[in-house]
Image (tube, rainbow, N blue to C red):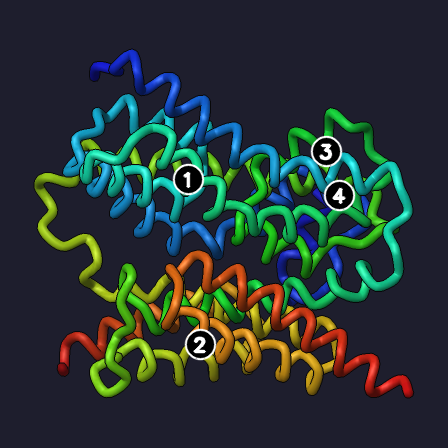
Amino acid sequence: MEIRPEFWLLLLGVSLVTLLPRVLPLVTLNRMQMPDWMMRFLRHIPVAVMAALLAQSLLTEGEALIPLTENINLIALVPTLAVACFTRSLLAAVIAGIISMLIIRLFL
Amino acid sequence: METAATSSLNELSHPAANAGFWQGVKDCVPTLLGYLSIGFACGVVGRTAGLSTAEIVLLSTFLYAGSAQFIVAGMIAAGGTMYSIIVTVLFVNIRHLLLSAAISPYFRSFPWWKNVLLGSQLTDETFGVAVNRLSNDWKHRDKWMFGLNITAHINWIAATFAGAYFGAWIPDPEAYGLSFALPAMFIGLLVLQMAHRKQIRTDLAVAGGAVVLFLAAFTVMSANLAVLTAIIGAACIGMVIEHGNQT
C-alpha cells in the first residue's frame, strides 16, 4: 500500500486538469446570460454525447476498430434497443444488454 | 416518504417537487452495473501497470474519470513523462466543458460553492441521467444531483478498489456478458433522452451524425479526440437542421 512521492504531483496535475472543465462552465455561465446560439448548440449536446459514446463503446476496442463482421456488440444492440424503446427504463435496458451478451457468448 | 410514489412510475415521469437526495441515490442504481465492471477492469489494469492499490483508490477519488484512469495506467506502464500524462488527460476530459455548460442553466440560482461541488463529480453517466430529469421548477434538484453524484462516485471507488485488490484472482472480468453493460447504459440513456425531448427526427439526425462523424474522425485521431469531434460536429448538425426548419 505504498504511494510514491512523485505520484502526488501526478495526482494533483491530472485531477486539476479534469476538475477545471467540469466546474468552470457551471460557475461562470451562471453569472452571465448565454448567447442564443450557444443555448441552441448546448440543447443538442446530450444526444450527441450519448450517441458518440455509444459508437465508441460498440465499435471500438481500445484504439482499434472492431471488424464489423466480427462485432458481436452489434447483435446485442438489437434486443437491448428494443427493450429500451419498449420499457423506457434504463435498468431494463442494462439488464437486457447483459443477458443478450451472455446468451451470445454462450452460442458463439 | 413521498418520493417512494414516484419510483413506481416509469423513469420519464418527473420526480415530485420535493424529491431530493435519496431519489438521486435511487436514480443512480441502473448505471451502477455498467461502471462496476468498467471500474473493476480499471483497477486490474492499474495494478498491471504497476500502480499500488492506494494509488488506484486516490486516482478514483480525485481524478474520477474512467477513460482518463485507463490512459494514466497505460502511459505509466509505457514510461510516459508526467507532463505528457497531464496534457493527455486534459484533452481526454475536455468534453466535460460541454456537459457542464449543458446543465448550467438548471443551476443558475445556486451559490457558486454548490456548483463547484456538483460539477466536480460530473461524469458521462450522471450527466446522462441528470439531463433527463432536471427542470427549473424543481426545488431540491441540487440535493438530488448530490445523491446521484455521491452514489456513482462511491460505486466507482469501490469497483476500482475491488479490481485492484481481487483482480489477480479473476481471469476475465469482461466475461459473463458484463462487457455489454456500458454500451447498454448508453443505449438506454439515448432512448430516454429522445423520448423525453419529442423532436425525434432532429435527434435521430444528431445521433446518426455523431456515429458517422466518430467513425470518420477515428480514422485519423485517437478514440477520445474522435468522440469530442463527433459531439461538437453532431450538435452543429442539430443547429443547422433546426435553423432550416424555422426558415
Residue on which the image places disc 3: B115
Please, which chain is the residue tagged with disc 2 on? Answer: B
Q: Amino acid at mark 3?
A: Asn
Sequence order check, earlier mark of 3 and 1: 3
Q: Nearer the viewer, mark 3 or mark 1?
A: 3
How much space separates mark 4 and mark 3, taking CA atoms? Answer: 12 Å
For residue A79, side relative to residue A24 (left or right) = left
Residue on which the image places disc 2: B216
Mark 4 nearby-residue class (10 Å; few <14, some 14–19, many ≥20): many
How much space separates mark 1 and mark 4, taking CA atoms? Answer: 21 Å
Instruction: Please say if the residues under marks 4 and 2 sit with CB atoms less than 8 Å apart.
Output: no
Q: Nearer the viewer, mark 4 or mark 2?
A: 2
Residue under disc 3 on the same chain as residue under disc 2:
yes
> Secondary structure beneath disc 4?
helix
> Secondary structure beneath disc 1?
helix
Mark 3 nearby-residue class (10 Å; few <14, some 14–19, many ≥20): many
Sequence order check, earlier mark of 3 and 2: 3
